[in-house]
Amino acid sequence: MARTGFYPGSFDPVTYGHLDIIARSARLVDKLVLGVGVHHGKQALIPAETRIALLEKVTRPIVEHTGVKIAVTTFDGLAVDAARKHHAGLIIRGLRDSTDFDYEVQMGQMNGAMAPDIETVFLAASPATRMIASSLVKQIARLGGDITLFIPKEAQEVMAKALAKPSH
Ligand code: ADP
């Protein structure tokens, strides 16, 4: 039976850290659904449709290399509900440090209580990308810093456009 994983996140913007988790989860599943969170009250820099298009573009090499199907979608409710909607038996999360660990394990356990049929799989961040956080990438970009080490070229272009808007 085909195994589907659901990887939820803000991806605002997608980073090399996310791509590392996506590439490694491709070894665990036949299909990966990337859930772009669009929660009310959580203001994103990049519009959801742009984040979707960007994720589709930057994950194409992983699809070509692994043969794993990747679908990108938005969700605005519980991750477990979105996972179930997409017939995913696994929720994938990345762990960078002890802050991620405490929060992610607690959330994974509460999700497990709500949806015992869905297993959360935690992947430890790879050493080369462990320090990358979308929030810091945004701060660095706003201050005119070089973000080429942290996010793919396509994401840099999207960031440049988003930051050029007067509202940001
Ligand atoms: P949010 O924190 O809003 O859910 P993010 O897009 O920041 O969304 O993160 C989504 C998931 O990806 C989380 O599990 C997070 O821990 C993980 N993640 C983020 N950055 C990295 C990274 N550099 N390496 C490994 N995992 C990461």
Image (cartoon, helix red, strand yellow):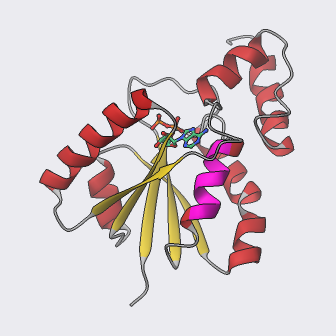
Residue located farthest toward the bottom when viewing the structure as drawn: 1
User: Residue 71: which quarter of the image?
Assistant: bottom right
The stretch drawn in magenta includes residue 157: no
Which quarter of the figure is the C terminus placed in? top right
Residue located farthest toward the left when viewing the structure as drawn: 113
User: Residue 117: which quarter of the image?
Assistant: bottom left
Does 31 sit left or right of 1 as displayed? right
Front-most of 96 and 5? 96
x%, y% of residue 59?
71, 60
The stretch drawn in magenta includes residue 22: yes
Vertical arrangement, residue 132 with respect to residue 59, above or below: above
x%, y% of residue 1?
38, 90
x%, y% of residue 140?
75, 16
Rendered residue at 18%/59% (across/down): 115
Callout count? 0
- From this viewpoint, is residue 165 visible? no
Looking at the rendering, the stretch of residues picked out in magenta corresponds to 17-24
Does 154 sit left or right of 119 as displayed? right
User: Residue 58: which quarter of the image?
Assistant: bottom right
x%, y% of residue 152?
81, 43
Rendered residue at 21%/47% (across/down): 109
Front-most of 97 and 13? 97
- From this viewpoint, is residue 132 visible? yes
- Prevalent SS, magenta region: helix
Rendered residue at 38%/36% (across/down): 101
Vertical arrangement, residue 68 with respect to residue 156, above or below: below
Rendered residue at 64%/43% (across/down): 17
Residue located farthest toward the front when viewing the structure as drawn: 127
Does 90 sit left or right of 155 as displayed? left
